[in-house]
Image (cartoon, rainbow, N blue to C red):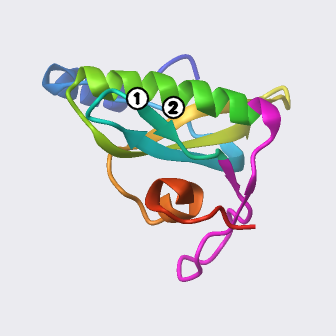
């Protein structure tokens, strides 16, 4: 496929004047990650530790479990958190933020990282598990 189908292109032309849109290809997700933290009203960024979802095929009723992210992913998510935090501050936002990320396999079989797949400028269900020090809890084992 060389580009978006006419239906998708028409949708984009219609919506773009109203603000940015994100068009992402369908990919096979290998692993999912998250980093949570806080953008302070004073401009301070506080990040929790990047985590890997330990079971991405979990039933919706079960609570997610987390494990450590690999060092290269940890570094990339830390940089992504700083970049997103600075952008949120520039918009006048302060408060909690969570960033979702994932690795995916390209057509050649290479695993690649999308360090920012979604930004949640709010408390999420996993905030206390992923950034416990920011809510007065100890990190889970």
**Residues tagged 2 and 1 counted as in contact (Cβ below 8 A):** yes
90 vs 65, nearest the viewer: 90
Q: Is residue 131 left or right of residue 57?
A: left
Q: Which residue shows up at 66% across the image and 73% down it?
A: 58
Residue 82: x, y in percent? Answer: 49, 25
Tell how many labels: 2
Residue drawn at 43 percent across, 27 percent down: 84
Question: SS at mark 1?
Answer: helix
Q: Nearer the viewer, residue 69 or 16?
A: 69
The verdict on residue 67 being magenta is yes
In the rendered view, would you say 107 is above or below 134?
A: above
Q: Residues within 10 Å of mark 1 (few under 14, many from 20)?
A: many
- Please name the residue that numbered disc 1 is placed on: 85
Q: Which secondary structure dominates the residues rendered in magenta?
A: loop
Residue of label 2 = 81
Instruction: Pinpoint residue 115: horizontal percent, then vertical percent.
Output: 60, 32
Which region of the structure is painted magenta? 51-72
The vertical placement of 5 against 26, above or below, is above
Q: Name the disc covering residue 51, or none.
A: none
- Locate the C terminus and report the quarter of the image it occupies: bottom right
Q: Residue at x 20, y 28 (%)?
A: 92
**Residue 5 visible in the current orientation:** no
Residue depicted at 22% across the width and 22% down the height: 16
């Amino acid at each position: 496929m060389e580009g978006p189908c006419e239906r998708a292109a028409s949708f984009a032309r219609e919506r773009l004047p109203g603000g940015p849109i994100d068009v992402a290809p369908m990919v096979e997700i290998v692993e999912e990650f998250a980093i949570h933290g806080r953008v302070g009203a004073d401009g301070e960024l506080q990040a929790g530790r990047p985590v890997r979802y330990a079971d991405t095929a979990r039933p919706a009723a079960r609570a997610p479990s987390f494990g450590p992210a690999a060092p290269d992913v940890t570094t990339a998510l830390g940089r992504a958190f700083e970049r997103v935090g600075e952008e949120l501050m520039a918009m006048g936002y302060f408060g909690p933020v969570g960033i979702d990320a994932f690795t995916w396999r390209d057509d050649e079989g290479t695993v690649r990282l999308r360090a920012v797949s979604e930004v949640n400028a709010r408390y999420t269900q996993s905030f206390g598990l992923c950034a416990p020090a920011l809510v007065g809890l100890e990190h889970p084992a």
